[in-house]
Amino acid sequence: MFDPGFYQTVLPDRVKQQCAMQSGHVPVVEFRLADGTVLDVCHIAHLADKWLAVAYFRDAGACQEMDLAFFGYEMVTRVTLSMHDPRSRRLGFEIGQPEVPRTVRADPSD
């Protein structure tokens, strides 16, 4: 099972490595879920203890509209990283720091 550490460290490192090796190409990351759904991921929006949220392209060819999907880590059965020619794909996976849960207090003076 892919855990939060994979999405925080391994995946971004591999994307950076591939981008350095194939400069000028667009990184594309796809998540295959246990129900057969394939998400063309733009970026990871949030990592929680038991689930994550990703922004994914509705239409990978157009790369104009995105939806947000929430699911448990165990739902991800495969993560695929590929590099595409920018003439065929103008936007791809965006490396950023996903929001990571932190303790929130009801009374800020505590």
Image: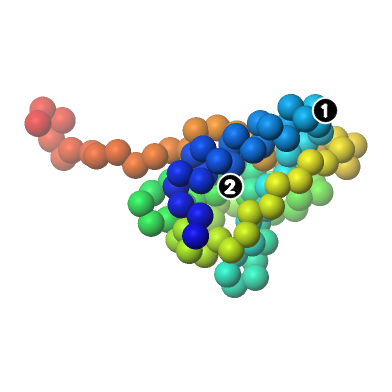
Counting other residues with Cα less than 10 Å from the Cα at mark 1, is it few (<14), some (14-19), or many (20 or more)? few
Residue that badge 1 annotates: 24
Q: Is residue 75 left or right of residue 59?
A: left
Residue projecting furthest to the right: 87
List the residue tagged with mark 2: 55
Residue 58 picture location, percent across and down: 69, 54
Q: Closer to us: mark 2 or mark 1?
A: 1
Q: Residue at x 66, y 31 (%)?
A: 16
Coordinates of residue 4 in the picture (x, y in percent): 44, 47
The local secondary structure at tag 1 comes to loop
Side of 48 where 98 appears, left or right: right
Q: Is residue 10 visible?
A: yes
Q: Is residue 103 left or right of residue 85?
A: left
Identify the amino acid type marked 2: Ala
Amino acid identity at mark 1: Gly
Q: Residue furthest left?
A: 110
Q: Residue 104 lies in what quarter of the image?
A: top left
Q: Position of residue 1 (x, y in %)?
A: 49, 60
Mark 1 or mark 2, which is nearer the start of the sequence? 1
